[in-house]
Amino acid sequence: MAPSSFWHWLVGPRQRPDVHIILYTRAACPLCEVAWHLLEESQKAYGFTLEAKDIDVDAELVREFGNCVPVVVIDGVVRFRGKVNEVLLRRMLDGGPQSD
């Protein structure tokens, strides 16, 4: 086991109250439900702010995202569309401040 993996296992994930995640979603979207569950579980571990926005209540959001949901925005940057990659999400949260 790599030293960083051992440390993560020993002390748990780094708390990230500085991170704000928005899930753009819509009703009856199975991928959205999976994404929400994954984000809720990650929020318990990392302590970030999590918010869901139903795109169908805002015509501008419907124009922006169309049928491409879920969309995960981390600190203002679109990071996932469709399926959320759990490994990449964890790496982003473990890696410190987000940048492009």
Image (cartoon, rainbow, N blue to C red):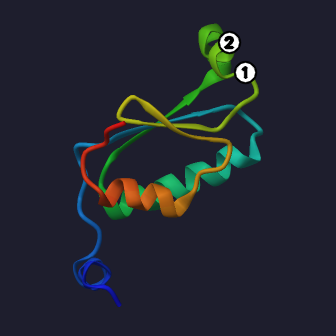
Front residue of 46/85: it is 85
Q: Position of residue 11 (x, y in %)?
A: 22, 79
Q: Residue at x 53, y 61 (%)?
A: 86
Q: Is residue 93 above or below residue 62?
A: below
Query: Where is residue 29 shown, x and y percent of the image?
Result: 75, 40
Q: Residues within 10 Å of mark 2 (few under 14, many from 20)?
A: few
Residue 5 lies in what quarter of the image?
Answer: bottom left
Residue type marked 2: Arg
Question: Residue 31's spot in the image, x, y percent?
Answer: 71, 47
Residue shown at 22%/43% (left/top)? Answer: 18
**Cα distance between the residues tagged 2 and 1:** 6 Å
Residue lying at the far front of the rendered structure: 100
Q: Looking at the rendered structure, which numbered label has been put on residue 66?
A: 1
Q: Residue at x 66, y 49 (%)?
A: 83
Q: Secondary structure at mark 2?
A: helix
Q: Nearer the viewer, residue 22 or 73?
A: 73
